[in-house]
Amino acid sequence: LEEAQRSGKDPAVVASEAVAIAGLRGDLARLTAEAMLRNRVIAERLGCLNAAGLEEMRQGRAPTVTKGPYRGDQLSVDHIIPLSVMPEFDKVIANLELMPLRMNVKKNAGMGDRQQDLLKKLRAAGL
């Protein structure tokens, strides 16, 4: 999505096209595209979309956070709805969110309002 943005394409259009190619439809497609766009913004705010960060991601490595209080940390992927609650959502993109590794390690596996809301939406979308 960042490369699309840099080349003048609308990341929202690219995300929608990507989920359609993956065969997602309806609410699940919308939730997935929204998560992709949200994660691009998070990576941008954490300073992970610079040349070095993009190269690390192309090589399958976590980029380094270069902005904010977690500067120097690695970017990680968090499961919004914890795996201990819904292990079947392990690879559901709509359930994944980028955050600094130290923040992710400190996060508990609780189900607050945000997690409950996402669970309802994912179930309504057919998961």
Image (tube, grey):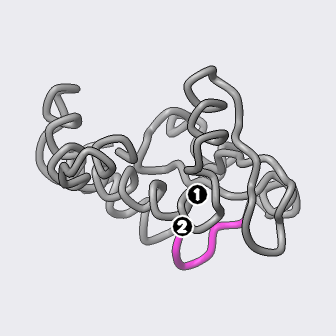
**Quadrant placement of the N terminus:** top left
Label 2 environment density (alpha carbons within 10 Å; few <14, some 14–19, many ≥20): some
Amino acid of disc 1: Ile
**Quadrant placement of the C terminus:** top left
Q: Earlier in the sequence, mark 2 or mark 1?
A: 1
Q: Residue at x 65, y 50 (%)?
A: 78
Q: Residue at x 78, y 56 (%)?
A: 104
Which region is colored magenta?
Answer: 110-114
Residue at image mark 2 = 115
Amino acid of disc 2: Gln
In percent of width and height, residue 109 lies at 75, 59
Pointer 2 and pointer 1: residues touching (CB < 8 Å)? yes
Q: Magenta span: helix, strand or loop, mainly? A: loop
SS at circle 2: helix
In percent of width and height, residue 28 lies at 24, 47
Residue at image mark 1 = 80
In percent of width and height, residue 105 lies at 86, 54
**Residue 63 vs residue 40: left or right?**
right
**Residue 116 vs residue 94: left or right?**
right
Q: Is residue 116 above or below residue 6?
A: below
**Residue 82 vs residue 38: left or right?**
right
